Amino acid sequence: MHPTRMFAVVSLVVVVAGAALADAKPMPWTGNYASNTPYEPQQALHTYEPPPEGYEVVFTQLLARHGSRALTSATNIHFVKQLIARASAAGALTELGRQLEPEVVRFEEANVRVGYGNLSRRGVAEHEHLAERLLARLPDLFAGGIRSGRRIRVLTSGKDRAVDSGNNFVAALAGTLPALEPLIDPTVVNTDLLYFHKAPQNADYQDWLAHDPTLAAKLDQIFYSETSHRQARRVLERLFDPGFVDTLGAGGNLFLDPDTGAPVSFNAVDAAVALYTLYQVAPGLSEEGTWHFERFVPQPAARWFAYLKDAEDFYDKGPSFAPATITFKMAQVLQDDFFAAVEAIRDGQSTRLAELRFAHAEIVIPLAALMRLPFSDRQVPVEDTYRYRDNTWRGALVTPYAANIQWDVYASPEGDLLVRMLYNEREARFKDGCRSIRDDSVYYRFDELKRCYGYE
């Protein structure tokens, strides 16, 4: 079992100088949570570029990841508890190590109360507030939609946390503006569109992910590097006696998989990353308790293990190896859907007010790579390796909890359409080669986007 499939870890939160996003407030998260970073909007309402004179907003569409959640399973908690039990039996717990078990037990209880994989209270609020800010940004769109009876379409992947995120979002729309409630259509599940990585038509991707030797070798090279072992000892020797850590470093330790009961080989890196998973997920459960996992995971180690998670997501789901496209070509169906929705508005075939889609990181990451959005446009040759120092891809920027890609469509009286994209509520440019209406503008003619993305 490859450890990067077994454990979730976290990522460095950075604001990259010179990125192709408009100025915005920096993320407040100073920890290293990668794609499990709790959501914060990335631009203040009053700083958005206004549309050109004569253009009015006529439509908006959104793809959003689910909000903050509990651990997806009890696996990492059970591995950490086994580790503590072995160290305790060996008399190998340090003073700090003895403080770990009560924290893990409290965290386990909170995850059980929420339900593994379910949205936390923060995750619910993330989508409620996202909806409220959408209404605040586009008041004319929704007021006009109410007058004309235009409807709102809602689609999800069908998975509980995506369904719940969509329900929380539309409930907030209706709660804030009750006249919208009768205009919200029943939610539609579309797995081909919003869970495409598991769809039968993408069996080639699934096989590549499970069996490609180049991918496996690259991730093993990164995950079990000398730096990983060094940072693992930095974590573990604060909790356990060095002799006990030596036994983990030797590898070959068998722990029981809590789901299957089968023995699983475990080494020092695996142990440290299992603990780090709890550190990663804890901020998303901030309303369920006060957690102190930062006591057990020093920041230098947190930054390194964050990189491991980012590397896995970069190669498994994102830009990946140059010039391969297998990780993101499957997102074409969703990109097509974005373009088709605007085309239908222009051609008078749709009178929808909004189209709202709720999915997962596995959907946001490939779409961002396919569209070559900010932070997602740089692949790495097989002979090279993804590194922070020369690549801007970060899970915390590309797909934090509740990550969202929004297109607002504006029309002139003559029927000319402009599109403005927001990425995590920050004005964003489309890929290089797409020409906005001015060099300093984030508005693009729809015909230009069709040309640029090959839809002519």
Image: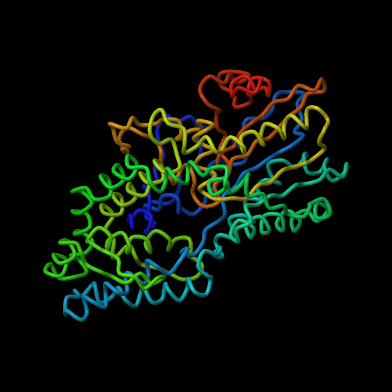
Pinpoint residue 429: horizontal percent, then vertical percent. 55, 28
What residue lies at 37% left-to-right and 52% top-to-bottom? 32
What residue lies at 15% left-to-right and 67% top-to-bottom? 247
What residue lies at 81% left-to-right and 45% top-to-bottom? 151
Toward which corner of the image does residue 419 lie, by quadrant? top right
Q: In this view, does 165 lie above or below 438?
A: below
Q: In this view, does 278 lie above or below 423?
A: below
Q: For this rendering, which residue is in front, 139 or 213?
A: 213
Residue reaching furthest left? Answer: 243
Residue reaching furthest right? Answer: 148
Q: For this rendering, which residue is in front, 118 or 143?
A: 118
Pinpoint residue 136: horizontal percent, then vertical percent. 69, 45
Pinpoint residue 385: horizontal percent, then vertical percent. 29, 36
What residue lies at 48% left-to-right and 41% top-to-bottom? 204
Instruction: Name the side, left or right, on which 21 lies relative to 453.
Output: left
Pinpoint residue 290: horizontal percent, then vertical percent. 43, 69
Q: In this view, does 329 lie above or below 260?
A: above
Instruction: Name the side, left or right, on which 43 lies relative to 276.
Output: right
How many numbered badges does the structure rendering display?
A: 0
The N terminus lies in quadrant: bottom left
Coloration mode: rainbow
Q: For this rendering, which residue is in front, 387 or 181?
A: 387
Instruction: Name the side, left or right, on which 146 lies relative to 317.
Output: right
The C terminus lies in quadrant: top right
Toward which corner of the image does residue 216 lie, by quadrant? top left
Instruction: Name the side, left or right, on which 216 lies relative to 69.
Output: left
